[in-house]
Image (cartoon, helix red, strand yellow):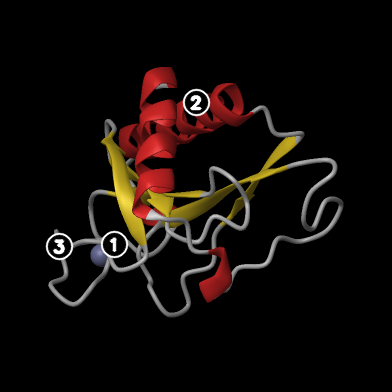
Amino acid sequence: MKDANCRYCTSAEDIAVKVAELDVSNLWLTKDQAYRGRCILSLKDHKAELFQLEPGELEAFSRDMARAAKALYEAFSPGKINYAAFGDTYPHVHFHLVPKYQDGKSWGSQFELSLSGDKLASPEELAGRVKEIQKHL
Ligand SMILES: [Zn+2]
């Protein structure tokens, strides 16, 4: 099921560029690259809560998340990948996958979620990072 008014049902291209379509999800690289390699993994179907996924779908989504995180790890060598799910304003299952670096921003604390104009990557930087992630998927 899709919701025509939902960013993740239609296109998240206002805030991200698509990296890949995985088994039951889409992987997006956010235009805000304050954290190098920051991505969003969104379920293909419009469902608000993890408990609404079919058992097989939940397992497949978990596999997609692990696959995406491994690709980020191999592409960017972060100290740790952070995972976060909120969705108050976009109630469609999606997780923020945020590579964190030991000498980088917010290490040891919560990452900053909001888009900050000065951290927007150029189209060339985004394209390069998309390619780097795709190589490792
Ligand atoms: Zn949706």
Q: In percent of the image, x 60 and y 27: which residue is there? A: 73
Q: In percent of the image, x 54 and y 67: which residue is there? A: 86
Question: On the image, numbered disc 3 is attached to which residue?
Answer: 2
Amino acid type, callout 2: Ala
Say whether mark 2 is within 8 Å of ligand 1.
Answer: no
Looking at the image, which is closer to me, 124 or 3? 124
Q: Residues within 10 Å of mark 3 (few under 14, many from 20)?
A: few
Nearer to us of marks 1 and 3 is: 1
Looking at the image, which is closer to me, 47 or 111? 111
Question: On the image, numbered disc 1 is attached to which residue?
Answer: 12
Query: Quadrant holding ligand 1?
Result: bottom left
Q: Is residue 17 left or right of residue 74?
A: left
Say whether mark 3 is within 8 Å of ligand 1.
Answer: yes
Residue 119, percent from left and from top: 56, 64
Amino acid type, callout 1: Ala
Question: On the image, numbered disc 2 is attached to which residue?
Answer: 71
Give SS at disc 1: loop
